[in-house]
Image (tube, rainbow, N blue to C red):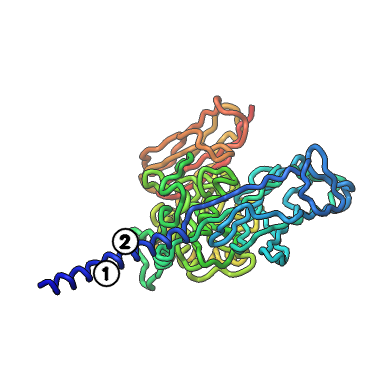
Amino acid sequence: MLRFLQILLLVYIGFVTTTLDLIAQNSSDWQTDTTKIHTEHIQIDFSTTNILKSTENAKLSDGGIQKIDPDARITFVSKQIEVPINNISPFLALGSRFVFSQVTDQPESLLFEVRYAFQSGDWSEWEFVENDDHLTTSPDTLIGTLQFLPSESQFIQFRITLPKSLNGQTIQLRSLNLSFTSPGSTPSTILEEIRQKSVKVPDSRKRIFQSYPMPEFVTRTDWGSPDGQEPSGPVSLTNVTHQIVHHTAGTNSSSDWPAVVRSTWEYHVNTNGWSDIGYNWLIDPNGVIYQGRGWINGNDEVLGAHFCGTNSNTMGVALMGNFEEVKPTLDSQNSLIELLAWKSDEKNIDPIGKDFHPSSGFNLFTISGHRDGCSTLCPGENLYMNLPQIRDAVHEKIGHVFNPPVAFTVKNNFPNPFFDQTTLTFSIPDPGNVRITVWNAAGKLVEVLTDRFYEAQTHTEMWKAANYASGVYFGRVEYEGLVIVEKMLVIR
């Protein structure tokens, strides 16, 4: 009996020791693979800086650095800058934000390059930093895309070149803010769980008589959003009519894509000052979908910040990578198709059709690229050229037939232009509900004229504009999922 108790005690001690070892191992794993984000900033004032190593055709002034000869280019190189954070993991995300005192030239013509060095002092090749068209929204500010440098980077150096000016005009560069971010490595167990969420699409997933399913995705909590599921800053809802495709223009390879998402969140929020990450969704090259801008009480149609300052009625989806340089993976495109099919089905959006987008003032494909709204390379040529096939694939997935009634018409409003009031005339082939709304040129809803049932015939509705300022307005007539828009001009 005593021998049995001794054996039992040894087993118990062994069990406790093993359990404590496992706890210690997991604790160590979290300590070394923490997802805690650490960011430091270095602010450079070009009116007083002593950080420049060499200059060509440049001088310092009260408003910043400017050209000596406006008809020649300007070039200057910084001294080496020590990276202001330690224990970087899994990489260093370097951000850049330029502010100009004078912008008579196009500030996007600025050429910004960086390089890095380890403790040994051997420098990498110069790397060109592209403009981030998602973040650059002010004429006096230019923001570079995140650069992903090795975690061992100890020093960085930058080189700036401004080309020859046009007509003697010049750019005066006032300041540069450099952000250094360590997003923290994703714990290996969580990283493996996330990798398992890549969308695997069976060939026969087409849905005709039921809602198309939402694809599996990684929640904000799971990818390590510092705000958790809900954004800490103010965001608002929108009604999605258009889905906008982007690329992040960043790295094309990573062993830790959730850390890339965290870096993007940090750059958007704590460097650019937004309330949350700008994209509604992100997709990595493995096809894993990440929940972006935080939902409000479970509602996913949150107004993003991604489409040329005209974000109303859009859902922004960013494939991670730079697709000017490489082609997007098939896995990432398949996940994009699944995501667009779900939203198209849910909102009764014709994925191969066009619809007027009031905020931008353009008649856009309901699945468009970022460049369709403004001057930008996004989503990269190699992804943009695939959008027609992506639209067709989404259309085939959801199996809807969008056949417009041939007799739904809207006549041009009369009079137009007008001072006080104008009349909208429309005809519908079958009885149904008609909603007529008026939007201003900024994409803001200003009035609902009607939203009720009509018989199958011709009808008229009047818009009284006496209380509205002069300008361009749009009358949107909706019937049975179809939309016709009339441009109306108020003059005073």
Q: How many marks?
A: 2
Residue extending farthest to the left is: 1
In the image: residue 167, left or right of residue 188: right
Residue sitting at x 51%, y 49%? 277
Q: Which residue is mark 1?
A: 14
Q: Nearer the viewer, mark 2 or mark 1?
A: 1
User: Which percent across, then down, holds residue 303?
Assistant: 49, 45
Residue extending farthest to the front is: 2
Within-10-Å neighbours for mark 1: few <14, some 14–19, many 20+: few
Callout 2 amino acid: Phe
Callout 1 amino acid: Gly
Q: Is residue 330 visible?
A: yes
Residue sitting at x 56%, y 58%? 88
User: Which percent across, then down, holds residue 49?
Assistant: 77, 44
Within-10-Å neighbours for mark 2: few <14, some 14–19, many 20+: few
Q: Please, what secondary structure does the residue beneath circle 2 have?
A: loop
* Dot 2 or dot 1, earlier in sequence: 1
Q: Which residue is mark 2?
A: 209
Give the image quarter of residue 310. Answer: top right
Q: Please, what secondary structure does the residue beneath circle 1 have?
A: helix
Q: How far is mark 2 from mark 1, CA to CA?
A: 58 Å
User: Which percent across, then down, holds residue 390?
Assistant: 50, 65
User: Which percent across, then down, holds residue 372?
Assistant: 60, 54
Residue sitting at x 64%, y 67%? 325
In the image: residue 60, left or right of residue 136: right
For the C terminus, which image quadrant?
Answer: top right
The relative height of residue 52 versus residue 2 in the rendered view (above or below) is above
Say which mark, if any, is on residue 480: none
Give the image quarter of residue 86. Answer: bottom right
The relative height of residue 347 versus residue 103 in the rendered view (above or below) is below
